Image: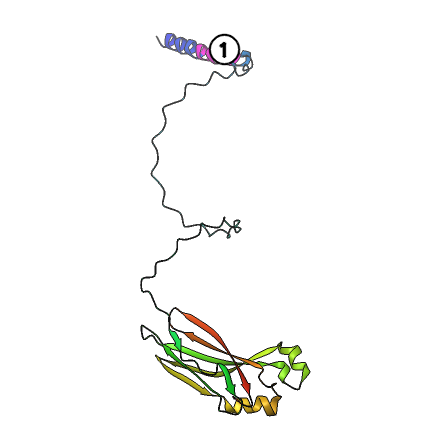
Amino acid sequence: MNGNILGALALVIALIAAVFAGASFILEEEGPIGPIGPTGEAGEAGPPGVSGPQGDQGEPGPKGDKGATGPRGPAGADGADGKDLEPNEAPHIDNVTMVGRVCYWDDWMFCADINDPEEDLMKVEGYLKLETSWLPYGFIEGLMGDHIWIPLFNEVGYSDTYCFNATSIRDAIHGEWGSVAACHPISWRLDVMDGENFISEEYEFVACECCE
């Protein structure tokens, strides 16, 4: 009985050894791994993914440089004439003295009645025309032309009589400055301005030594 058991064990051990030996033989006899086969065709695209959440708004970018100035556009059409919402009548100049023939040695009183129909505030200016040929200095004519307007008065007021005594100017013209030929025409000017009107009138007189 014992001998049979021992024999059976010997047989089992021999079989196990044979199995390992065969396995080793099989591993040793296995050939090399073959090359990788060709890549297969790409599969169909999957459905689009779900959009992700919108990101935060970015900071404003820097301001760009100023562009070049464009060409000037064509001139527009002329506008229509305006409508005078408050017509303004011009002042009237009446009763002017120092016109015509005057005595040279009388007082030179320049006067005029100025009346504004609407009683506007006015600016009144008077000027005497001094011809540079009356003066003894020839270079003055080259600098200032053939005449100079000397201010007589410059006033602001309403309808009234405006006067100026120019006797001292007469004496200077005929004495200190130069001389005026007898009965030579002398001009003076009166400028009147109100809110909308400008009137400039020139008058002429001759001054003789005798008025007869």
Considering depth in this image, is 106 or 120 the residue closer to the camera?
106
Residue 84 at what x, y percent from top left?
34, 61
Residue 204 at what x, y percent from top left?
51, 78
Tell me which residue sits at (60%, 92%) in the image. 175
Considering depth in this image, is 141 or 53 the residue closer to the camera?
141
Query: Is residue 129 shown above or below 19?
Result: below
Question: Label 1 neighbourhood size at 10 Å, few (<14), some (14-19), many (20+)?
Answer: few
Q: Secondary structure at mark 1?
A: helix
Q: How many marks?
A: 1
Residue 67 at what x, y percent from top left?
51, 50
Residue 134 at what x, y percent from top left?
62, 84
Query: Is residue 194 shown above or below 20?
Result: below
Looking at the image, the residue that sits furthest to the front is 212
- Mark 1 residue type: Gly
Taking the image as shown, residue 55 lies to the left or right of residue 134, namely: left
Main SS of the magenta part reads helix
Query: Is residue 32 shown above or below 101?
Result: above
Considering depth in this image, is 87 or 134 the residue closer to the camera?
134
Tell me which residue sits at (35%, 33%) in the image. 51
Q: Which residues are magenta?
A: 14-26
Tell me which residue sits at (58%, 88%) in the image. 173
The residue tagged 1 is 22
Taking the image as shown, residue 9 lies to the left or right of residue 202, namely: left
